[in-house]
C-alpha cells in the first residue's frame, strides 16, 4: 500500500548533525472521512521530503479507522491545493491536502 512512516525521510542541515528540516502542511477531511479522523483542519509538521503517502501514513498512525478507509480501493479522493494528486508526489511547505470519500463506487 504506502511506505511505512517509520521510513519517513528527513534531511539534515549542512554543517549541523541531526538537525531535521521540517515543513508545515494542513489536512482537511470531509464527509465520513472527517467522522473518523477529525473535524476541522489538521495542522501537521512533516519532513521536508515527505510525500502525500507519508501524510496518509501519519493519519493512519494517529487515527486507526482511517486505515480502513484507506484500504478500500478507490474509496477516497485526495487533492492537494484543489487538484487530484498521486500519493508519490512530494508535499510543499504550506500545502493543503483535502481528503473525502469517493461519490462513485461499484
Image: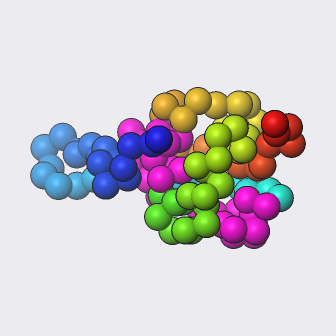
Total marks placed? 0
Left or right? Give the position of 81 relative to 59. Answer: right
Position of 46 relative to 85 (above/below): below
State which quadrant residue 30 falls in: bottom right
Residue 10 seen by the camera: yes
* Residue bounds of the magenta highlight: 32-57
Q: Residue furthest front?
A: 106
Q: Is residue 34 magenta?
A: yes
Look at the picture and state if 89 lies above or below 11.
above
Is residue 25 toward the left or the right of residue 96 in the image? left
- Seen from the viewer's position, the closer of residues 32 and 72 is 72
Left or right of 47 on screen, residue 69: right
Do we see residue 78 in this rendering?
no
Closer to us: 88 or 102: 102
Residue found at x 69% / y 38%:
74
**Is 88 situated above or below 64?**
above
Q: Residue at x 66, y 66 (%)?
A: 37
| Residue drawn at (73%, 31%) of the image | 83
Q: How was the colour assigned to the protein in this rendering?
A: rainbow
Residue 9 vertical placement versus 20 (above, below): above
| Residue 33 or residue 89, whichever sits in front | 33
Quadrant containing the C terminus in the rendered view: top right
The percent position of residue 11, horizontal first and vertical second, equals: 27, 43
- The percent coordinates of residue 102 (x first, y second) are 80, 43
Q: Residue at x 38, y 52 (%)?
A: 5
Residue 86: image location, x then y, percent: 58, 30
Query: In the displayed structure, does residue 11 sit left or right of residue 91?
Result: left
Q: Is residue 69 magenta?
A: no
* Quadrant of res 29: bottom right
Amino acid at each position: 500500500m504506502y511506505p511505512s512512516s517509520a521510513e519517513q525521510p528527513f534531511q539534515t542541515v549542512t554543517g549541523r548533525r541531526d538537525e531535521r528540516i521540517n515543513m508545515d502542511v494542513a489536512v482537511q477531511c470531509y464527509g465520513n472521512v472527517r467522522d473518523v479522523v477529525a473535524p476541522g483542519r489538521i495542522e501537521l509538521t512533516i519532513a521536508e521530503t515527505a510525500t502525500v503517502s507519508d501524510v496518509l501514513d501519519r493519519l493512519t498512525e494517529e487515527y486507526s479507522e482511517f486505515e480502513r478507509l484507506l484500504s478500500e480501493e478507490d474509496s477516497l479522493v485526495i487533492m492537494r491545493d484543489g487538484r487530484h494528486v498521486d500519493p508519490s508526489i512530494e508535499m510543499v511547505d504550506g500545502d493543503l491536502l483535502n481528503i473525502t470519500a469517493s461519490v462513485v463506487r461499484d
